[in-house]
Image (spheres, helix red, strand yellow):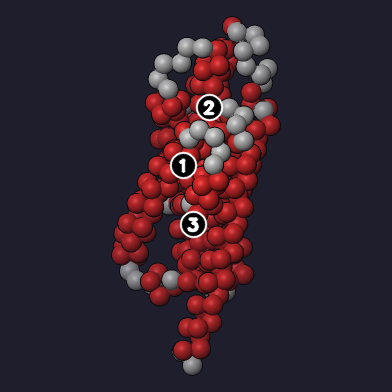
Amino acid sequence: MAVVLVAAVAAALAPINSDFYHVWIYNDPQTNEELHEEVMIDMFMAHTSGFFWGQIIALILGAFLAARVRGMPRALGSAVCAGLLLAAVDFAVAWQSSAGIRQRIAWWTENHPGFLPTDPLSDGGFHHVLAVGLASFPVAAIAGVGLGTLITPLLRLPAVVVAILAVLAAVPYGAFAAVSGWFAAAADGEPMALFVLLALLPPAAVTPSAVRTAIGDHGDAFTNTMLVSGVGWALLLLIAGLLARRRRSRSGR
């Protein structure tokens, strides 16, 4: 179910992200610099389609694994495998759905020599965004194991109730994080407040990471913030989950 959902989200968002610059940043690019930014940002965004929601799905899946798989080591192993699978599916669907943007890039490189790098897909910043974004899937799943261990009694409710609660929690958080990420992407400069915001809301870093790296404006710092923050949250949730499990064990004696 999680695989199908991730694939569906990636496929649905790819056409929107392929026109990200025009819709969300500037709808009338004219100068060479603006046109260059449009192509690069659309390329980065299209090929990371679904990463934001895919990582939230990986988090929820990790929580379910914590409640269904006996023993945290097994749950963590299952979560890592599941996160890697979701990452692979998301990228495969995003790549397949982004053929149009690659055709646009091919047209630009053929008709405007020197306008874009010879092979934008081999750009180091592009690889950095992909690597960090894909690595964040298993990290989110690991964080989910910690979260699931922390709230195990809640996850033992009927599946329908748990699913509804998951949606009610994930959608508002996802919307808030997405809006925060968009403001971070559109902001001028690199104020420390942005990095603090992205550290507190790691999924929000997906959008600014792709946008900032595409235009060469300290994008690596945003992607690194996203990954380090994700790892930090995963460790905190695992520790909290272990402490909660120990407390439940003691109270049950």
Q: Residue at x 55, y 60 (%)?
A: 233
Q: Is residue 108 above or below residue 211?
A: above
Q: Residue at x 36, y 51 (%)?
A: 171
Kind of residue at disc 2: Ile
Q: What is the C-alpha distance between the residues marked 3 and 1?
A: 19 Å
Please give the residue where the numbered disc 3 appears in the rendered image: 59
What residue occupies the far bottom of the structure in this picture?
253
Tell me, for residue 41, which label it has, or none: 2
First-in-chain label (3 vs 1):
3
Q: What is the C-alpha distance between the residues marked 1 and 2?
A: 15 Å
| Image spot of residue 194 (x, y percent) | 51, 44
Q: Is residue 209 above or below residue 66?
A: above
Q: Residue at x 48, y 35 (%)?
A: 187
| Image spot of residue 99 (x, y percent) | 52, 24
Q: Residue at x 46, y 64 (%)?
A: 64
- Residues under numbered marks 3 and 1 in contact, where contact means CB atoms less than 8 Å apart: no
Q: What is the C-alpha distance between the residues marked 2 and 3?
A: 27 Å
Rate crowding at label 1 as few (under 14), some (14 to 19) or many (20 or more) other CA atoms within 10 Å.
Answer: many
Rate crowding at label 2 as few (under 14), some (14 to 19) or many (20 or more) other CA atoms within 10 Å.
Answer: many
Secondary-structure class at tag 3: helix
Kind of residue at disc 3: Leu
Kind of residue at disc 1: Gly
204 or 160, which is in the foreground?
A: 204
Secondary-structure class at tag 2: helix
- Indicate which label's residue lies in the foreground, 3 or 1: 1
- Residues under numbered marks 2 and 3 in contact, where contact means CB atoms less than 8 Å apart: no
